[in-house]
Image (spheres, rainbow, N blue to C red):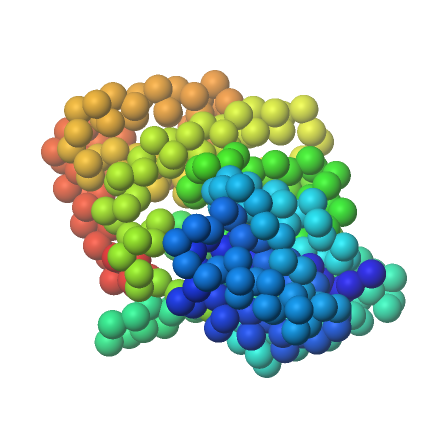
Amino acid sequence: MKLLSIAVPCYNSESYMKKCLDSLLAGGEDVEILIVDDGSTKDRTPEIADAYQEKYPTIVKAIHQENKGHGGAVNTGIDHATGLYFKVVDSDDWLGKGSFLSVLDTLRELAAAGRIVDVLFANYVYEKQNRKYKKYVMRYQMYLPENRIFGWDQVKRMNVFHYVLMHSLIYRTGLLREVGLRLPEHTFYVDNIYAFVPFSKVKTMYYLNVNLYRYFIGRSDQSVNEKVMMSRFPQQLRVAYTMLDYLEQFHKLRLHPKQRQFLLHDVSIIMIITTSMMLRSGDPEILKERKPLWNRLKKADYLGYLQIRSSASGVAMSLPGKGGGKVVTKGYHVIEKVFGFD
């Protein structure tokens, strides 16, 4: 069994996938690299995937499938993974070598001691191109204990500027299968679901304060580009409703209070992002979706709804008309300067 399976969803990724794959090869034989060619047709992505498999047959597996979108590619990676742990690395991103080796050392030591954790957190870095300040690191030392196994009792509540993304996470592969995680196909922004649903079953965690994941931001066609996000608003809304459906189901589980708070934090982030997009759009048809979305949160978790709605960000989201739009726009520009999304 491999120590770590890494799924690399690729769709017409010829111009940047080699940098990603070469960074993953630093893991050697402990790592299984699953290149998921998601129906690429416009470039040499399939040939490059096959070439890596031929050159590194004990490490790389090339998987070709009809186009299913990012979520479908991640599902395929989970289906084919043989590693004890599982991570997703997008084909335009990469891992820092020193941090990657430190993470593998930690996972290896935990496995040797028979202390398998459900999830390992590490930092990720926004690699923003063409900016004076190119990098912003998302760290968690204020909220998570470092260099030891911990449970929900030791987790502190995060603020609105700190959140967990797919990039932060290495899951136990078996956990993903126990949860039955299946991401929606042909839908962007499903990484929010990936960083949400499994935590309903997480019990043991580990945080390594290293800058592992390098998150590239700079292509005009990226999903985090503001114009692209607005064009894909229906998919963003679909993800938000999917998370609220899960939130309602979680009432059946016996969750630790801090576990529930962690999940509500994820929901608050998706509510802020989705509502911000509505207000910034100025489109009457899109704005009609605001009240039904918040009513769905109220139905899914009434106490959670009250908590999120009464927060500073929730109050801003509830401001009517142009006033709400102005507050949200100003807030967006503050965040954009820090993270450099657009």
Q: Residue furthest left?
A: 322
Relative to 271, residue 98 above or below: below
Tell me the quadrant of the picture where the C terminus can be found: bottom left
Residue 98 seen anywhere in this rendered image of the structure: yes
Residue 41, image x, y percentages = 43, 50
> At 31% across and 61% down in the image, what residue appears?
219
Give the residue displayed 53% in from the left and 41% down from the top.
66
Residue 162 vertical position relative to residue 233 in the rendered view, above or below: below
Res. 2 image quadrant: bottom right
Q: Residue 63 versus residue 81: which sits nearer the camera?
A: 63
Q: Position of residue 157 (x, y in %)?
A: 52, 50
Quadrant assignment, res 305: top left
Image coordinates for residue 90, horizontal then vertical, percent: 50, 58
258 vs 253, left or right, is: left
Up the image or down, 208 lies above or below 73; here it is below
Horizontal arrangement in the rendering, residue 111 relative to residue 69 (left or right): right
Query: Which residue is found at the position 62% from the left and 52% from the top?
Result: 63
The total of numbered circles placed on residues is 0
Say which residue appears at 61% left-offset and 43% top-offset: 75
Nearer-the-camera pick, 219 or 203: 219
The answer to whether residue 212 is seen in the rendering is: no
Question: In the rendered view of the protein, which quadrant contains the N terminus?
Answer: bottom right
| Residue 106 versus residue 307 in the image, above or below | below
Q: Dividing the picture into quarters, in which one does residue 282 lie?
A: top left
Return the residue nearer the eye: 139 or 195: 195
Residue 17: percent from the left, percent from the top? 48, 66
